[in-house]
Amino acid sequence: CKIVQCWIPICSHISNRETCKLFRFPANDVECKVWAKLRRADTYPTKRYKIYGCHFKDGIGENGPTMFDWTKNTFFLFISPENISSMQ
């Protein structure tokens, strides 16, 4: 059994693939940079980093990682990469 640590800071969720889906960082550079702004100034994501599905609304990767222990009672909008490019 291989235990994977989540890239999100202060995440104490330790699991295996059967109980919580793991998401890789997107290959798209724009989307990857959006995800990387999740308050990890100490490291930049590489292929080996993953984020647990519990950090995504409804466990869906397309929703973007927005659910963290420090934001449990906070609502904020995830802007998709398509919308970011149209805003520039």
Image (tube, rainbow, N blue to C red):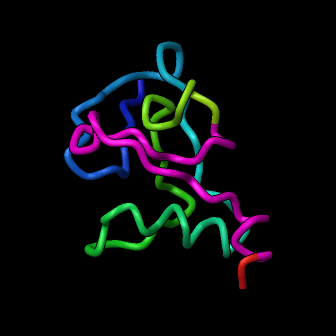
- Report the front residue among 29 and 68: 68
The structure residue drawn at horizontal position 60% and vertical position 67%, both measured from the top left corner, is: 32
Q: Position of residue 27 (x, y in %)?
A: 71, 64
User: What residue is at 79 percent from the left and 65 percent from the top?
Assistant: 82
Image quarter (top left, top right, bottom left or bottom right) of the C terminus:
bottom right
- Residue 44 x %, y %: 42, 73
- Is 18 displayed left or right of 61 in the figure? left
Q: Nearer the viewer, residue 32 or 88?
A: 88
Residue at the (26%, 73%) spot, across then down: 42
Q: Residue furthest bottom?
A: 88
In the rendered structure, the answer to whether residue 46 lies left or right of residue 43 reads right
Position of 19 compared to 61: left or right?
Answer: left
**6 relative to 9, above or below:** above
- The image shows residue 60, relative to residue 65, as above or below, that is above
Residue 85 on the magenta segment = yes
> What residue range appears in magenta?
61-86
Frontmost residue, 73 versus 3? 73
Q: Is 54 above or below relative to 46?
A: above
Residue 72 falls in which quadrant of the image? top left
